[in-house]
Amino acid sequence: MRCIECGSVANAPGADFRCAQCGDLLHIEYPSLRDRSDSLRPVWRERRSSSLAADQSGVWRFRELLPQLADLQTAITLREGNTPVYELPSCARSSGVEHLLAKHQGMNPTGSFKDTGMTVASSFARQNGFRWVACASTGNTSASMAAYAARGAMRSLVLIPEGMISWGKLSQALDYGAVTCQLRTDFDGCMHVLNDVVKRMPVYLLNSVNPYRIEGQKTAAIELLEQLDWELPDHVIVPGGNLGNSSALGKAFLELRELSLISRLPKLSIMQAEKANPLYRSVREHLGKKIVPVSADTLATAIRIGNPASWKKALRVLEATGGTVEQVSETEIAAAKAEIGADGIGCEPASAVTLAGLKKLRQQGFVRQGETVILILTGHVLKDPEYTLKFHRGDLFPGVENEQWNRGMQRLQRAPVVVDASADAVLRILEQAEKS
Ligand code: F0G
């Protein structure tokens, strides 16, 4: 593996996947496949009708662009990837773009995009003989890691911030058998503790600093282009937390261009919550030269991260693709989430920053009306039902200062109504609904 910052090579990477020379993150490079790139698209397509487990995986199907396992049959797979691309007609109208699509990574086996990276990284953990895998998480990584560890007969250790992850995600980790520690700190504090743990015990770190995870997550971009018949979109918009996913998608686009499978790059833009915005601030206040950790706070708990590990990689992607970074408010996120729901799709709050961000980029003229935009929806709507219920009951942002916003949201809110058990009572409700 090569260090992305100073270029030095580490054959046996340290426990935390950082370069011994400069401390930056390592990444995986490929010998060029240029001479056989023409054959790749038909091979990838044909594998979709194969009965081999690895071919049925929407990750391992693209294995020419992944690190090679000694034996492909040992891949730990839940048939991840293979996620749909949906049109979002009313979101397109409200954001003022003609072609708006969502790649729904929440349709993965454990309900988030993490599965695409976890299948690769957990397979290498097992190949390398690890009995224990571990991660710090805002919830989705832990759910995914616990599932893949269980499938691969490994034990898993999860460090999560106490009281700051959704019940859906926490319950997944428990069901899949992880040893789960709720630490009295935030995500960044959990990461700090975990880095210490991996230095003192042979557990394999499965956070997105693990370069195998980035490799697996790359495949979402390849699959997306395949679904678009290799017609390149103008913009791809992705939420930013620890910044592994934006780095992964960007790496994929760059590699596909290197292989001449695409001739230009879509602009990849990253959206953050206003109070968890270290990348946004880095670009606006420090021209991307440094990152100043923030004390993160957002109801979109998946991206409640103040000190993102992969910020340099993400900045390289913004620069290479001509994308940008924006921040959105809590109320903008909530409204966008409800709109995605109203299009019959739904997603978790962190994913909705993409639509909220698109609206800003459209207003700024960065996205134009006729351009094709892809939102990467990263998590399933059932991940955080408490947030959704609070929104529909009008309890998400209480207080007089939010009264006006709450009134504006009534067109999207659908609080359940308690009625007598009679057809008359139900019909009266229907009549009211018809009028509204
Ligand atoms: N969306 C969701 C639903 C997530 O769970 C995460 C990250 C992100 C977006 C941000 O992706 O970190 O690659 O920039 N969740 C991690 C976790 C941190 O522990 O589950 P990123």
Image (cartoon, rainbow, N blue to C red):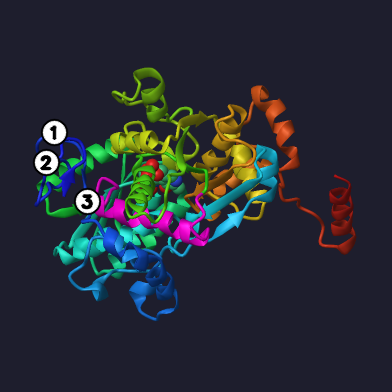
Q: Is tag 1's residue or tag 2's residue first in the polypeptide sequence? A: 2
Residue at which label 2 appears = 8
Q: Name which residue type carries label 3.
A: Ile
| Residue on which the image places disc 3 | 28
Whether tag 3 and tag 2 are in contact, CB under 8 A, the answer is no
Q: Secondary structure at mark 2?
A: loop
Q: Read off the residue under disc 1.
A: 22
* Marks 3 and 2, the one that precedes in the sequence: 2
Q: Is residue 207 magenta?
A: yes
Residue type at numbered disc 2? Ser
Placement of 374 over or under 39, stated as above or below: above
Q: For the point 14% across and 65% down, which residue is it? A: 129
Residue 192 vertical placement versus 277 (above, below): below
Say whether mark 2 is within 8 Å of ligand 1: no
Q: Determine whether, in the image, residue 40 is placed left or right of residue 98.
A: left
Instruction: Classify residue 73 as left or right of residue 127.
Output: right
Q: Is residue 17 left or right of residue 119?
A: left
Q: Amino acid at mark 1?
A: Cys
What residue range appears in magenta? 205-232
Image region (quadrant) for ligand 1: top left
Q: Are marks 1 and 2 in contact (CB under 8 Å)?
A: yes
